[in-house]
Image: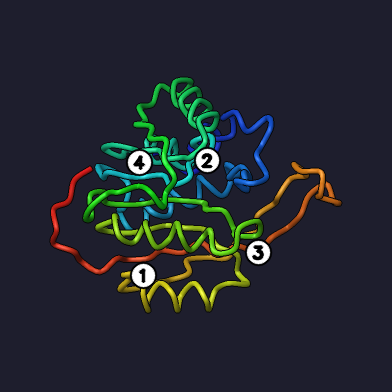
Amino acid sequence: MMKLKQLDGLLGHLQQFSKPKVELEQYPTGHHIASRMLFTAESSFGDVSDKVVADFGCGCGTLGAAAALLGAQQVIAIDIDSESLELALLNAENLELDLDLVQCDIKNLGWRGQIVDTVVMNPPFGTRKKGADMDFLFVALQVASEAVYSLHKSSTRDHVKRAALGSFNASSAEVICELRFDLPQLYKFHKKKEVDVAVDLWRFVPKSNRGNGCF
């Protein structure tokens, strides 16, 4: 398996948003967080190599690229924004990786049954549109058969766990670690050059669903 340092180095060369869209809460997933998130998913749980992995709200494709570099059988990168998908494709081509790109609002995905093994995502935190992160989590737990890895603000920990176990089809919800998410000064309303946000890296295991499902 690729070493963490090598994975981190490759992800560090990916192009990021030049003009992020505030309404979509487009914050790039830093390569340090992305590499550790996917490396942990593979090294500790075996949830990446030879698996079908979906990257929800893929942005510039950092998590999807990490999954491909760690040997995923197939990576499906989904985003509502066509410019993000163009950037994700460019990044994948530069690393000679194959990503299957889908332009879609996650809430309108329309997949039936658990048709991917693992979902990885850095969803909108819900600061612009309340509950946006939970919309992503709800769908992810319907379509993944093995695991969902997701980043959520640590301040929402109790709410996330309650929702996941109570009504979102999770059989388990575990915070693997707490991370410092450095948000760069991307938007005019940011007063500081960089903002530290405490985020949890979660691993959710969906309840089994025997439906075969299809696109």
Inter-mark Cα distance, 1 to 2: 35 Å
Q: Secondary structure at mark 3?
A: strand
Q: Nearer the viewer, mark 4 or mark 1?
A: 1
Q: Residue at x 43, y 48 (%)?
A: 38
Q: Amino acid at mark 4?
A: Met
Residue ID for mark 1: 168
Left-right relation of 170 to 61: left
Residue 97 position, x and y percent, is 38, 26
State the quadrant of the N terminus. top left
Q: Secondary structure at mark 1?
A: loop
Residue ID for mark 4: 1
Q: Residue at x 50, y 22 (%)?
A: 90
Q: Amino acid at mark 3?
A: Ala
Q: Secondary structure at mark 4?
A: loop
Q: Earlier in the sequence, mark 2 or mark 3?
A: 2
Q: Nearer the viewer, mark 2 or mark 3?
A: 3
Residue ID for mark 3: 198
Residue ID for mark 2: 5
